[in-house]
Image: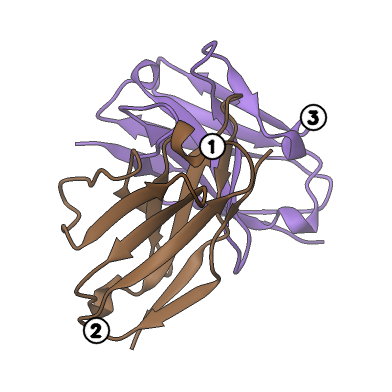
């Protein structure tokens, strides 16, 4: 049975950074494609980046380049998303989403992590 | 990057059929698989359609997906609407650089 469990709610000040974790059970991280998606209040889903099946590296959406780092601890089957230089408009629910069969089709999602950026 | 455009909202009565469209701005809709996700308030998205027209085993066959190359769009059709189908629905696809894009989402009201 697959479980995807994220870290808890965060409250940060502008210019701070946040690191969200995502632990996967039922699959090894090396078997899946890990991605990060955010959802701002009352708005839609926005892909931030994730596993690139072309070369096995991480691909980051242009909007977030220079501010986000995505890493994995394969020994703990846990992925991390680190976002720096936070702004109030980064206030959102951050999801990890995984593809188990096809890299860019997300069949399991974490429960979401609310990150609030406010002075 | 390309865009996926969905209607902001649709509404229909219980028992009826509704279709939600998802139009791709550039690149062929048929070249990259389209997924559809259902998101109820306060919950994470779940897959209702993957690979253009495949359903996860737990999704009822009232849900179906299709792709139309002539309009460069994908569609999600829900038949025999139930009040429990009321949710936001998002289409998703990608491009030849493996960048992922979501549609803006469609709020389905069943009234």
- For the residues labelled 3 and 1, the Cα–Cα distance comes to 30 Å
Query: Given this view, does label 2 or label 3 mark the residue nearer the observer?
Result: 2
Q: Secondary structure at mark 3?
A: loop
Q: Which residue sits at x=51%, y=13%?
A: A56
Q: Nearer the viewer, residue A47 or A75?
A: A47
Q: Nearer the viewer, residue B95 or A111?
A: B95
x and y percentages locating residue A68 in the rendered image: 70, 33
Q: Secondary structure at mark 2?
A: loop
Query: Given this view, does label 1 or label 2 mark the residue nearer the observer?
Result: 1
- For the residues labelled 1 and 2, the Cα–Cα distance comes to 34 Å
x and y percentages locating residue A16 in the rendered image: 79, 44
Label 2 marks which chain's residue? B
Q: Are marks 3 and 1 on the same chain?
A: no
Is residue A101 toward the left or the right of residue A73 in the image?
left
Q: Chain A is which colour?
A: purple
Name the residue that disc number 1 marks.
B28
Q: Which residue sits at x=68%, y=57%?
A: A91
Q: Reading the chain from its start, which is encountered first: label 1 or label 2?
A: 2
Name the residue that disc number 2 marks.
B14
Q: Secondary structure at mark 1?
A: loop
Name the residue that disc number 3 marks.
A66
Chain brown in the figure, letter: B
Which part of the image, by quadrant, shows the C terminus of chain B? bottom left
x and y percentages locating residue B97 in the rendered image: 61, 24
């Amino acid at each position: 049975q697959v479980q995807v469990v994220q870290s808890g709610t965060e409250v940060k000040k502008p210019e701070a950074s946040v690191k969200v974790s995502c632990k996967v059970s039922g699959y090894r991280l090396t078997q899946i494609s890990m991605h990060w998606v955010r959802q701002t209040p009352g708005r839609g889903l926005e892909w931030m980046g994730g596993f690139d099946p072309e070369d096995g590296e991480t691909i980051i959406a242009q909007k977030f380049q220079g501010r986000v780092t995505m890493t994995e601890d394969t020994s703990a089957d846990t992925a991390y998303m680190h976002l720096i230089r936070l702004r109030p408009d980064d206030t959102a629910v951050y999801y990890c989403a995984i593809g188990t069969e096809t890299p860019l089709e997300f069949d399991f999602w974490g429960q979401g992590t609310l990150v609030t950026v406010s002075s | 990057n390309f865009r996926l455009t969905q209607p902001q909202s649709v509404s229909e009565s219980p028992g009826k059929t509704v279709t939600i469209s998802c139009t791709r701005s550039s690149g062929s809709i048929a070249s990259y698989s389209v997924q559809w996700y259902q998101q109820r308030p306060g919950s994470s998205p779940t897959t209702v359609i993957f690979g253009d027209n495949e359903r996860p085993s737990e999704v009822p066959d009232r849900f179906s997906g299709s792709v139309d190359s002539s309009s460069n769009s994908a569609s999600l059709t829900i038949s025999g609407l139930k009040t429990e189908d009321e949710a936001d629905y998002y289409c998703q696809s990608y491009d030849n650089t493996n960048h992922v894009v979501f549609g803006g989402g469609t709020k389905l009201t069943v009234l």
